[in-house]
Amino acid sequence: MKKLLLTAMLLAMTNCLNAQEKDEKFKLEKGTWALTGKFSLGSDRATFDSAPDNESTRFNLNILPSAEYFISDNLSIGLGLAYNYNESEFESSSTNNVNINNLYSVSSYIKKYVSVSKKLSFSLQGGLGYTYTDSKYISSQNEPSGSISNRYSITFRPGITYLITDDLAFEANLGRLGYSHQNSRNKSSSDKAYEDSFDFDLKATNILFGLTFYL
C-alpha cells in the first residue's frame, strides 16, 4: 500500500513538474493581435586635435509603429511604418556643411519568437520594405542641393521580447542584416544613380526599443 501511495505521489509530482515546465515557456497564442511602437535616438560630436577649429556633429531619430497578427503560436505576420530623420554637420573656420535626410518607409514581415523563459523570448524578423528619402545638402560655399531616392530592401532583425504583463511587453531589436537596391536622382538636374548593397549594422541607430500591446 505504501509503495502504491509513493508511486502515485511520484506520478503526481512528475505531472505537476511537467505542467509547470510547460507553463514556464513563452507563448503568444494564435489569433492574438499586437500593436508596437519602437524608437531610437542618437547623437555624437567629434573634434580634431590636428584642426581644433573643425567640428563634426550627427543626430538621428527613428520612429516605427507596427501591427502584427499571430497566424500560429509564437509566429506572426505584420505591417510596419517608419520615419527617420538624420542630420550631420561639419563646421570649420572656412565652411559649414549640413546634410539633412527625411526617410519614410513601409514594410511587411514575418516574425518568429523562440522561448527562453515564461516572460522572455528571442525573436527573428524578416521582411520586405520600401523607403522614400528626401535629402538636402546645404553649404556656406555653394547653392543648396538635394536628391530623391527610392530603396527596396530585404531585411532581417534579431531581437528580444520581455513580457511585463500578459498584455504588455518590452521589445528591442539589436541591429540589422539585409540587402537593398536603390535608385536616386538629383533635384536640380537629370543625373541618376543606382546602388545595390549588403549590410550588417550594429550601430546605435539600429538598436530599437519599444512597447507592444497584445489584444
Image: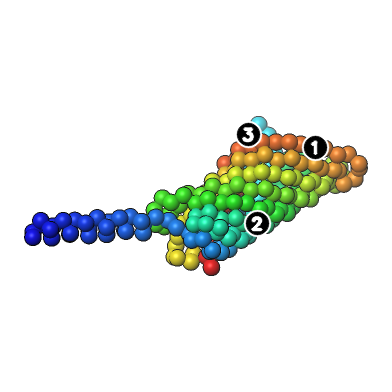
Q: Which residue is mark 3?
A: 49
Q: Secondary structure at mark 1?
A: strand
Q: Which residue is mark 1?
A: 194
Amino acid tagged 1:
Tyr
Q: Which residue is mark 2?
A: 80
From the viewer's perspective, is residue 208 above or below residue 199?
below
On the image, the x and y values in percent for residue 145 come to 85, 45
From the viewer's perspective, is residue 10 above or below residue 93?
below
Q: Secondary structure at mark 2?
A: strand
55 to the left or right of 173: right
From the viewer's perspective, is residue 88 above or below residue 18?
above
Observer able to see residue 139: no
Please tell me whether mark 2 or mark 1 is closer to you in this view: 2
Q: Quadrant of residue 6?
A: bottom left
The residue positioned 79% from the left and 50% from the top of the image is 134
The residue positioned 43% from the left and 56% from the top of the image is 26
Pointer 2 or 3: first along the chain: 3
> How packed is label 1: few (under 14 Cα within 10 Å), some, or many (20 or more)?
few
On the image, the x and y values in percent for residue 15 come to 27, 58
Q: Quadrant of residue 193?
A: top right
